[in-house]
Image (cartoon, helix red, strand yellow):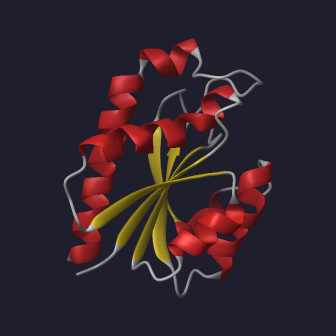
Amino acid sequence: MEKVIVLGIGNRLMMDDGIGIYVVEALAENHKDDQVQYLIGESDVDYCLEQIHGADTVIIVDAVFNNKKAGEVSIIPLEELREQQSLDISPHNIHLFNALYQQKDEVKGYLIAIEPSVIHFHIGLSKVLDGKWEQIKAEVEQKINLLKVETEG
């Protein structure tokens, strides 16, 4: 049986940068699948790397500026991170995304990227993402289930 880790990262103090954390927390409350472990990594790169060690598949959920509409959810394979964009976007992903990219032959995984609306000092989501909360959560859950099936198959 494959071990899948879904890791929410970001910073709750920076509005939409915390969307990955909020979504993974919400999905963890209702998850009944022993095959998937939901974890919150926030911006602690060392903790994230420690948790990822030994996983068959890693799914990172994070806010990523990707020139899409606010709240849009997309999937980026970890081995394509460098090709998709520069890896120096924010303090927490400099090290984690670079480390994962460096381990792309050993760590199989994906980034579920949620387009933020506002990243600024403030607790809670922007009005735009808050208004799309149920849609974002459902879409991320759907993409996690899709990726689980792909890794099993």
From what the image shows, is residue 108 above or below residue 36?
Answer: below
Q: Is residue 136 left or right of residue 99?
A: left
Count of all numbered marks drawn on residues in the image? 0
Q: Is residue 116 left or right of residue 24?
A: right
Does residue 70 appear in this view?
Answer: yes
Does residue 87 appear in this view?
Answer: no
Residue 148, given in percent of the width and then of the height, sits at: 27, 65
| Residue 101: quarter of image | bottom right
| Residue 56: quarter of image | bottom left
Please tell me which residue lies in front, 122 or 73: 122
Screen quadrant of the C terminus: bottom left
Residue 73, given in percent of the width and then of the height, sits at: 45, 40
Screen quadrant of the N terminus: bottom left
| Residue 99: quarter of image | bottom right
Residue found 69% across the figure and 51% down from its top: 43
Q: Is residue 12 left or right of residue 39?
A: right
Residue found 32% across the figure and 50% down from its top: 143
Residue 107, given in percent of the width and then of the height, sits at: 51, 80
From what the image shows, is residue 87 above or below residue 65?
Answer: below
From what the image shows, is residue 98 above or below residue 69?
Answer: below
Residue 130, given in percent of the width and then of the height, sits at: 48, 18
